[in-house]
Image (spheres, rainbow, N blue to C red):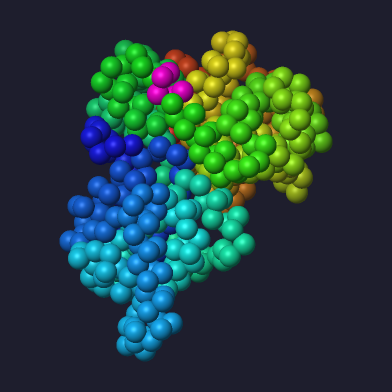
């Protein structure tokens, strides 16, 4: 994402400020899917809050220069030319790399695409313990560095932070609708035309999603060119992914096929996966529709790659409200609802199915921001609940139903009647909402404002 772009306000900026103001001598490792705006935001934050800024992209010449300097210093240390007792070789490396370097809290060093060098990654402990300088490292493919046999984990010296696609509340900010959005009553007591306006923007968000480049295109030209941009982003992601499996069967096409298969699994109306594991079901779809020679092992590698790359997120399954019986990774959602919509179009998912799936994807990603646990759906008897959340502090259980019609949903009604859930939450389109008998009905686009405290 280039620097010549509409300056979108991101909630992550405040998180970066908190990290700076409460600095604990740890390196900040920023994760996030490809093209979610990590580099742009980190550069902006650094320019506005530090006197000295050094930016190094390990995929560009600057990265090659840093590694060359590192190797020269290593040879000087071995030959005795560099006094190892008086000189910190890493500080010397940055001093030679940039005149901006100061070992000071006024200086920040950004190392982008950190997955490209396990040698630099393995220096994190020294960056954290030997420098006053602040360090931020970013990467979309950290699965790459952990695959290196020379890799070791510096967990105690790292703060992790994920930058995600724009949320719906950030989307409202980009449209200058934050004040109206926050003023809307959750239960239908505001002006109907205001609900209609935000609902229309919500439907746009399901198509546009939260990739900054696509949001900016939407702000400039509405939805005219967004499919071309999605095609480009998807192709970049798949091509870069296949590059990290060089010489393997995992080609760009295989990655694209796996993404389509993930969407197809999501579109199937059933309780979790049909096969004994998600990977087996993924493999079955791919071998039947796309390629007959992909193995279960390769499907598992691709799925793990998608997960570590933050392109997809997993969802657990709760069985009959037995919280000791939770099946892990029984469903996967794309981390950007706009990309999910684009893939559904490419996969030719019927509109009658895709509308509900997009709403569920929206709610799933909202839950990621709202709760401290992995979201889960539930099966109860012969029925299914879209999502379930149990408040760890007070034990209250919430059933969440994402509805497109007037049917109240038999399973959630049964769950409430039988005391399996404490509250039923219905998320609908242009509902006027309301509260009755431990049942809360709100417009789905206001779910980001909903609080699990009654």
Residue at image position (41%, 19%) is 228
Can residue 238 be seen by looking at this rendering?
A: yes
Residue at image position (67%, 37%) is 249
The quadrant in which residue 214 appears is top left
Task: Give the percent coordinates (x, y) of residue 340.
Answer: 52, 25
Please tell me whether residue 229 belongs to the stretch shown in magenta: yes
13 to the left or right of 153: left
224 to the left or right of 246: left
Residue at image position (76%, 21%) is 288
The quadrant in which residue 131 appears is bottom left
Which secondary structure is most common in the magenta stretch?
helix
Which region shows up in magenta? 227-231
Residue at image position (23%, 58%) is 53
Indicate whether 88 appears above or below 388.
below
The residue at the far right in this view is 276
Q: Nearer the viewer, residue 186 or 72?
A: 72
The quadrant of the image that shows the N terminus is top left
The residue at the far front in this view is 79
Please tell me whether residue 326 belongs to the stretch shown in magenta: no
Task: Give the percent coordinates (x, y) of residue 448.
Answer: 43, 34
Indicate whether 311 appears above or below 107.
above
The residue at the far left in this view is 51
Can residue 400 be seen by looking at this rendering?
A: no
Indicate whether 420 appears above or below 371.
above
Task: Give the percent coordinates (x, y) of residue 186.
Answer: 41, 27
429 to the left or right of 189: right
Task: Give the percent coordinates (x, y) of residue 399.
Answer: 62, 33
401 to the left or right of 415: left
């Amino acid at each position: 994402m280039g620097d010549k772009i509409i300056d979108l306000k991101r909630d992550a900026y405040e998180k970066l400020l908190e990290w700076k103001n409460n600095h604990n001598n740890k390196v900040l490792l920023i994760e996030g899917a490809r093209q979610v705006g990590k580099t742009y935001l980190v550069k902006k934050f650094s320019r506005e809050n530090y006197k000295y800024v050094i930016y190094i992209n390990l995929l560009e010449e600057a990265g090659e220069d840093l590694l060359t300097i590192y190797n020269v210093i290593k040879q000087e240390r071995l030959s005795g030319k560099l006094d190892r007792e008086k000189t910190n070789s890493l500080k010397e490396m940055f001093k030679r790399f940039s005149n901006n370097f100061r070992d000071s809290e006024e200086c920040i060093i950004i190392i982008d695409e950190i997955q490209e060098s396990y040698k630099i990654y393995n220096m994190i402990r020294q960056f954290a313990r030997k420098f006053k300088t602040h360090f931020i490292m970013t990467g979309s493919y950290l699965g790459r560095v952990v695959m290196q046999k020379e890799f070791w984990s510096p967990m105690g010296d790292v703060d992790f932070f994920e930058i995600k696609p724009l949320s719906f509340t950030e989307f409202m900010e980009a449209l200058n609708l934050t004040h109206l959005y926050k003023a809307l009553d959750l239960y239908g007591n505001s002006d109907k035309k205001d609900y209609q306006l935000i609902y229309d923007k919500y439907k746009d968000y399901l198509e546009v999603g939260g990739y900054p480049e696509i949001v900016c295109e939407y702000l400039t030209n509405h939805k005219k060119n967004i499919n071309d941009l999605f095609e480009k982003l998807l192709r970049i992601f798949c091509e870069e992914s296949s590059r990290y499996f060089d010489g393997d069967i995992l080609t760009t096409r295989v990655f694209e096929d796996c993404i389509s298969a993930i969407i197809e699994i999501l579109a199937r109306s059933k309780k979790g996966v049909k096969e004994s594991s998600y990977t087996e079901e993924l493999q079955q779809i791919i071998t039947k529709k796309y390629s007959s020679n992909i193995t279960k092992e390769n499907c598992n590698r691709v799925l793990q790659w998608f997960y570590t790359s933050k392109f997809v997120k997993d969802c657990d399954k709760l069985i009959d409200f037995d919280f000791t019986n939770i099946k892990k990774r029984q469903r996967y959602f794309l981390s950007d609802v706009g990309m999910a919509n684009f893939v559904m179009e490419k996969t030719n998912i019927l509109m009658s199915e895709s509308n509900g799936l997009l709403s569920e994807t929206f709610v799933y990603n909202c839950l990621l921001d709202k709760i401290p646990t992995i979201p889960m759906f539930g099966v109860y008897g012969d029925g299914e609940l879209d999502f379930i959340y149990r408040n760890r502090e007070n034990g209250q259980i919430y059933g969440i139903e994402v509805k497109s019609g007037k049917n109240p949903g038999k399973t959630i009604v049964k769950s409430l009647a039988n005391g399996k859930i404490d509250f039923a939450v219905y998320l609908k389109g242009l509902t006027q909402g309301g509260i009755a008998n431990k049942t809360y009905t709100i417009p789905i686009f206001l779910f980001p404002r909903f609080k699990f405290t009654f």
